[in-house]
Amino acid sequence: MKKLVSLFLALVMALSLASFASAEEPFEISILMPQFPAEVDFVMENNPVLQKIQELSGVKLNIQWGANSTYGDILNTTMTDKNPPMLIVATDARAPLIVNSARAGAFWDLTEAVKDTENYPNLAAGNEGIYANIAVDGHVYGIYRSRAFPRGGVYYRCDVAKEVGFDREVKTIADLTELAEKLAAKSEDTYALNMIGNYTAGTISIITVMHGAPNVWGVDENGDIYPAHKSPAYLEGLNWLRHLYEIGGIDPNFAQLSSSEWDNIERNGKCFMRFDCLDNAHRQQEWFENNAGVTEQIFQSVGPIAKEDGSITVWPQNAGFNGEILVMKKSVSEADLPKVIKFLDWCNTSEGQTIINAGLEGLTYAVNEDGLRYTPDDKKDEFQKNSLMYLNNLNQMGMGVAGNRENPKALVNRGYTQLRQRYEDLNAELAQYAVANPCYPFVSETYTASGAQLDQILSDAAVQYIAGLIDEAGLRAEWETWAMMGGDAVTQEYNEAYHAAQQ
């Protein structure tokens, strides 16, 4: 009799833990995600990708899109709604709105869930350090959207470099300087470095950290936190850019240029080098192959760049993630919370990742004889249209906390180069030199309230210095303004949090 009871209980438990897909009625989950412009509208009804997600996970998705260009405003409005979506994609995990909302109890605390290897094994397989980075006051409120680490670096037009007399590998800052100077001298109406006004932060961070500056915040010899701009290496990096600007290597109108123009500046042959995401190298290469008839490698991405003393320091373009997915308390009951977390866990399975990021075989991709995902030439237009209609920006829901589990995986190299594979290899190689921001896990009340204004002071000062509008004395005066406007308070608060964490 006891054996029968045990068997019955085991059967009940097995049924209770079965996939949502076995349920008669799907569990509906609403989600807000950013949407990027596309020529074809996303189709919600009778969408085969969404239908497949429902079939496999038991969840019917109700997607609300927010234009990426105004997503911050949309989030602000959504957070005050009486019935917001159950899931919110936040593109900035450290935005004051997110931090303050977490503290106010707007989101479910997922700290224990992301450690639960039995019920949520895929979420629990995530990186503890990255979870710590997105935590607020030690509590995890979201599932991070994993991104390549460190990702940022230098790439350039190697064909143009050869034309101007530089035909070797860039291994040192001295090599990079020589390359930039030769590209700057190519002609009167072209420039070496593709730098734009609304994303100077990445360009400046790459070159200053390369020279040895901290990543936003550093720890001095006394074990105290200090801002990166107080490092002599930060000024060395700015001087590198200022010199390049002075010799005509940066467009004098760079401060007015927008990120929407960034790619086209290179495609129009106006600039030949960029400090940015290294994956842009293969994207630009493939654009030239598809649109300009290029049949050889014309872009090159750079590996570790050493200082004069041989040391290497690399700015990570991100901290291993880009935002997070949060669960709203207003819309998700405590009883339904495990179902919502279970769905997030499913999204990180092999089948979940593949569908969210790539769609369905025969609809948005084909599989070659090596078992890799690709797009046949005769299906290019069809698959692209299907991707826009049925997949579009669903990848904004992708997390990949346990790494890339897609199956089949994408065919890495396309066209005439190995730049896609080089990108993967460089991420692994550069990661060992990545400089961490020691204050990333901590919250400064002053920065939460005034961080945007403080960052703008430093950014504007750097741009003005690079462009020769102010001298070093003027630059330091702006740094003093930053300190008085709240920078010193932020430094003190980070020091308190940092030292408390060391005890």
Image: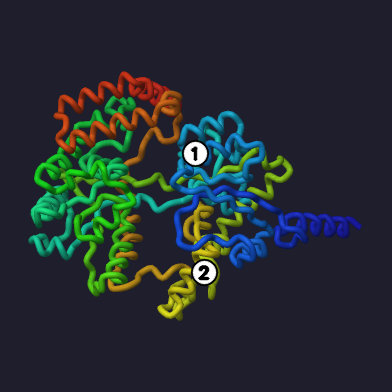
Q: Quadrant location of residue 220?
A: top left
Q: CA distance from mark 2 to mark 1?
A: 30 Å
The N terminus - image quarter? bottom right
**Which three-letter amino acid code belongs to the residue tagged 2?**
Asn
Q: Residue at x 14, y 29 (%)?
A: 471
Mark 1 residue element:
helix
Residue occupied by mark 1: 73
- In the image, 407: left or right of 427? right
Name the residue type under label 1: Asp
Front residue of this view, candidates 429 and 41: 41
Q: Considering the image in quadrants, where does the C terminus appear?
A: top left
| Above-or-below relation of 93 to 223 | below
User: How far across and how far down the image is residue 207, in percent?
Assistant: 23, 43
| Element type where label 2 sits in the image | helix
Residue occupying the far top of the picture: 484
Give above or below for 86 relative to 13: above
Give the percent coordinates (x, y) of residue 24.
Answer: 77, 61
Q: Is residue 181 left or right of residue 336?
A: left
Q: Residues within 10 Å of mark 2 (few under 14, many from 20)?
A: many
N-terminal-most mark, 2 or 1:
1
Viewer-proximal residue, 474 or 344? Answer: 474
* x then y, percent, for residue 105: 61, 31
Total number of numbered discs in the rendering: 2
381 with respect to 158 (left or right):
right
Label disc, if present, on residue 386 of the rendered structure: 2
Residue 74: give x, y in percent of width and height: 52, 41
The answer to the question of whether label 2 and label 1 lie on touching residues, with beta carbons closer than 8 A, is: no
Q: Residue at x 44, y 73 (%)?
A: 381
Residue 180 visible, this orientation: yes
- Quadrant of residue 213 in the image? top left
What residue do we see at 53% from left, 46% from top?
A: 89
Question: Which residue lies at the image location 30% right of the left edge and 65% below the top edge?
Answer: 419
